[in-house]
Amino acid sequence: MFQSNISLKEYSNYKIGGPARQFFVPKTLEELTAGVEKAKQEKLPIFVLGGGTNLLISDKGFPGLVVKPEIMTLEGKDGVIRVGAGVSVADLLAFTIANGLSGLEWAGGLPGTVGGAIRGNAGAFGGEIQDVITEVVSLDIAGAPKIINRGHKESKFGYRSSIFKEKNGEEIILEATLQLQNGEKKAIQEAIESKIQYRQERHPMEYPNIGSIFKNVDWKDVPKEFQERFVGKMKKDPFPVLPTAVLLSETGLKGVASGGAMFSPKHPNFIVNTQGATAEDVKKLIELAKETVKDKFGVILEEEVQYVE
């Protein structure tokens, strides 16, 4: 059932990470439940892997079971889509284009899986995944595995967060129901492609990366003595924020490196793997950014990154 000593580097967008003691790719709820029960019998900690984005995996790997669910349901009718957690965001967007369904155009170019997007309430360009979620089905593994169905309100979506993130591995997202609107296929496709182009032009896609390292800063948390200075940089995401990239640029961290990791000169809220970076290289830059921004602007940065160790 399980594979042993599997390199996680190959499953990380960062191309960083040591081996998983055990590795498992279930394709059905039954397989997933059986795998979870076996891991519990063997007293193995469990980590759920999606598309490998927003993850910094330890150089030592993970000492338990890494589960990569491939629950790939993708079907819809009358604007209601049922989608498995293992489906990539790219495949979901292709489905919306083919069926003329609008509401996810903001996600053009977003990496990772639907499960990961729900867990972190992924968002961009003023939109968030929670905007279209009506129900999420998960598997509670804190005790004996059991299915939980939650509506939008019960999922407790927040800025880059949800109840699933708060549960910190105690639940595995299985699938979700989305409500989209009918639209014109060509317009939907063009809107998605424009977001993809924006990312390609402004984000360092030429290097392995895991997306934004830090959350943008709530405008209310920017000290008043700096608000006038940055007011022209404020944006809605979906509420008023100051992009963390602005603060990192102002501190002169663009292009600063540690080992094989570097703050991207193109977009400093991306720490890119330029040449065989280790997790420790990345962590050093994360701490440098937090210390520098706090010292200069009095702002405490919060990581979007999930640490796997």
Image (spheres, rainbow, N blue to C red):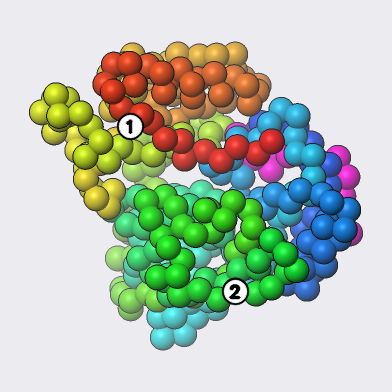
Name which of mark 2 and mark 1 comes first in the sequence: 2
Q: Which mark is residue 184?
A: none
Residue 216 higher or lower than 294, as above or below: below
Residue name at image x 43 percent, y 16 percent: 255
How many C-alpha atoms fall within 10 Å of the one at disc 2: few (<14), some, or many (≥20)?
some
Question: Residue 170, image x and y in percent?
Answer: 64, 58
Residue 244 shown left or right of residue 21 in the figure: left
How many C-alpha atoms fall within 10 Å of the one at disc 1: few (<14), some, or many (≥20)?
many
Quarter where residue 254 is shown: top left
Callout 2, which amino acid? Ile
Question: Residue 139, image x and y in percent?
Answer: 65, 68
Q: Which residues are magenta?
A: 1-14
Residue 308 shown left or right of residue 110 in the figure: right
Callout 1, which amino acid? Thr
Q: Which mark is residue 148?
A: 2
Residue 139 shown left or right of residue 218 in the figure: right
For the residue labelled by badge 1, is the local secondary structure a helix, a strand or a loop?
Answer: helix
Residue 247 shown left or right of residue 71 in the figure: left
